[in-house]
Image (cartoon, rainbow, N blue to C red):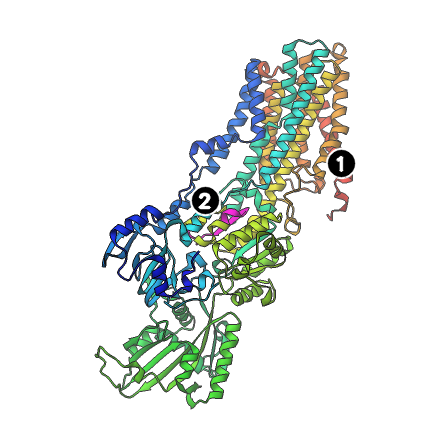
Amino acid sequence: MINFYNLGRRQAFKELKSSISGLTGKEAEKRLAKFGPNSLAEAKTVSRWQILISQFANPLIFILLLAGLISIIMREYTDAEVILVAVLINTIIGYFQENKANQSLSELKKAVEHRALVRRDGFETEIDSAQLVPGDIIILQSGQKVPADARMIESIDLQLNEAMLTGESVPVWKTVKIMPIGAALADRKNIVYAATEIVGGTGRAIVIATGVQTEIGKISAMVVETKEAATPLQIRLIKFSRLLGLIVGIISVLIVVLGIIQQRNLFDIFITAIAVAVAAIPEGLAVAVTVILAVGMKQILKQKALTRKLLAAETLGSITVICADKTGTLTEGKMRVAHIFAGGRELALEDFLEQDKGNNLTAIVRALEIGIICNNSIIENSESGLNREKIIGQPTEAALLSAGLDLGLDRDKLLAKEPRVGELPFNSNNKFMITLHSLAKSGYVLYEKGAPEKLLAKSSSIYINNSVLATNQAEKNLLLKKYEEFTAQGLRVIAVAYRELKELPWSIDSDHKDWDAIDSDLIFVGLIAFKDPLRAESRSAISECKRAGIRPIIITGDHKLTAQVIAAEAGIHCDIKDVITGEILDGVDDLELRALVKKHNIFARVSPHHKLRIVEALRANGEVVAMTGDGLNDSPALKAANIGVCLGSGTEVAKETSDLVLLDNNFQVIVSAIEEGRVIFQNIRKSITYLISDCFSEITLITGSIFFGIPLALLPTQILWINIINDGFPNFSLAFEKGDKNIMEQLPISPKEPLVNSEMKVIIVWLGLFRDLALLAIFIYFYHHLDILGWDINYLRTLFFAILGIKSLTSIFSLRSFTLPIWKINHGSNLYLLGAFFTSLILLILGIYLPLFQPILQTQALGSGSWLLILSIAFINILVMEFIKYFFTGQRHVKQ
């Protein structure tokens, strides 16, 4: 690979076999055939049909479909219909939540598809940018986008906004000078990059890369090639579903074998197998998880964050590392005046606002006045007056105007007193800007701002408290020292000065003004330091992340010193030697990088490829990573992260590759979204415990019936009613649970932690031993005394249908918390649950007493004595659950 930034112009022409006249038309055609069009890689889009089909790629759904198919074969159509309805509900919810087209690559393509001015056959001509080839000479003008990566051969004050690649919004001055080998992408001042914006000046450059070989092309390739790994919940559900499928398979085989041994009718054996399969499968689980995730997405939206992918809502709860892009994420993304040093005094802008303006602060006010007079930014007018947030111009000039508004300085009034009559624009060689103004009485005043060392060299006096005093080299050295102090704090610094003139050595109307004749003997006023300030909420959000066991890492394209200073302000402290740069990353392999990311928290001067490598290294170390960003340069890393977080002000490309879009550019929103993610996972676990404990009861009754050679305690249709209708509404209402109060003081949920943890297993298993075996014993006893009781088998099944239904409805109140006893839970905090309880209770009663349902469910009306037994068992069930929670889940050790 040729490092064109390290080559001179002649060497570049030689390597690319081109000349100042450009390529010939024929040569351009040959190269187009060789290198291909100057366009980006195509990505395969996911069709709506593919999204629909993907909803069935779930082992739980597969098992349900298999059970439905067997029911159809056995002509148990009612069972099949109920099963298929459960599948359909899950499919519809999942489809509509995930039916979002992937626009990432189309947005990238829009960034580079435009016209280009090129020199071919010795003439300038406009062509489609897709026709550009390496070796073409392109003409660059203000207001355009660069059509391809190119090496500068001529620059007349050319300035580019490269924020989409580097993340830094300060314009970059381009030069033709050779850059040192190993220079970071952001430091290659003689290279222009495709899709970046030209904000000033003109120039010419020779194309060195097109299409996928450009920097933006490499980003598009990374977006295409980066695969989205399964989320922690997907992995857990797959493992859980496989285990469940294995259990169902083993039990079904045992039932068939046992049935054959018992010489039962083959049809009855299959009906029994279906009953066990239906009992073992929590039909409502797939739908419940989808509903909990969908409700969680809405809760996250209330926190002003949009979750683009359903499963991402839960993944937030497992985040262990947040990789935060500095500019626009932790910081405001706008330059602000931070400090002014003038008249021997230094003040931070916020301190200055509280000072008496006449309290020896004349020099500081004068410095800012010069900054807003010698300035070409424009404040946009609105119906309500000046709009301070819409200042059009260079970032530093816009910052000066904004500071002037804060201090009540009116530039229009100042210019009315001293109208501008001339200007020498800033350029990369001079590093200063001059404006010339006429005075009311007579004469002129020159205002100048620029590089401190340049202005100090031309100054002979200094302005202190409305007085002008001669200066010497010692005083200049002190000012240079203050300049170095500011830069050591990661600040950008300019100086301001002025000179009064009785007359000019040339005519105001002259086209050839000799600015050097008046640009001397300046009166130095002061230094103005700028910074992109930390967002007000960033420090507290970082602190909360640490309390929650989440490690914050800063990744930025900015200089290491700036990164270190911002990190320290945010509460992430480290020595400058511990800041890892892109140059260091280029020298380490993937294994070494995995070691680096374990102990370093600040990465500076990094490229998009570096960001991607960092995220991949963290994930390889077992971390669950959230990556924040807002630029095109962040897109590959956003896609590679477990959770890509884009600011609302971010580019469309970044939004489309992210999982979470912040509607309020507030870092605190990320923390709130993580909290909601943890609540979602808690609620999923509550749902699983609730459903599995019910399934455990059903399996115990069915397998017990088979083992003891008696009729089934429940029919498949009755089991489906309990699992879907009876349990469904209360189960869905768990989506609205608020979560534990101390949830953000707990460690992140480990991706390796199983879906059903030890706490859940204890509740399910001990309930099975204490409660479900007792229910089986009661069923066997009643079955053998049917004649005495005057019941038939359908009445007994109806009784146990009601017992399981009421037991399930009442146990939901205890399972709202694994740590609090039922009497300490605020049952008024989830009104959806109360509504669901009464809805399911009414439906259960209708299933028992309504003639419409009785033939389907094979139920009979129950007497008052039966209901007394049902309620007694439900009450005992609650006592057993509370006993298990207290003695077996560590509830005794929780501070109430």
Q: Splitting the image into 4 quarters, where does residue 791 fall? A: top right
Give whichever of 542, 228 is nearer the camera.
228
Q: Which mark is residue 884?
A: 1
Q: Secondary structure at mark 1?
A: helix
Residue 134 in the image, given as x and y percentages of width and height = 34, 54
Task: Work out whether residue 620 can be spotted.
Answer: yes
Instruction: Identify the residue position indicated by label 2 in the image.
Output: 224
Residue 747 in the image, given as x and y percentages of width and height = 66, 49
Q: Secondary structure at mark 2?
A: helix
Give whichever of 681, 160 is nearer the camera.
160
Task: Work out whether residue 803 can be spotted.
Answer: no
Residue bounds of the magenta highlight:
638-651
46 sits left or right of 144 in the view: right
Three-letter code, disc 1: Ile
**Does 300 appear above or below 869?**
below
Q: Residues within 10 Å of mark 2 (few under 14, many from 20)?
A: some
**Does 465 appear above or below 599?**
below
Give whichever of 39, 223 is nearer the camera.
39
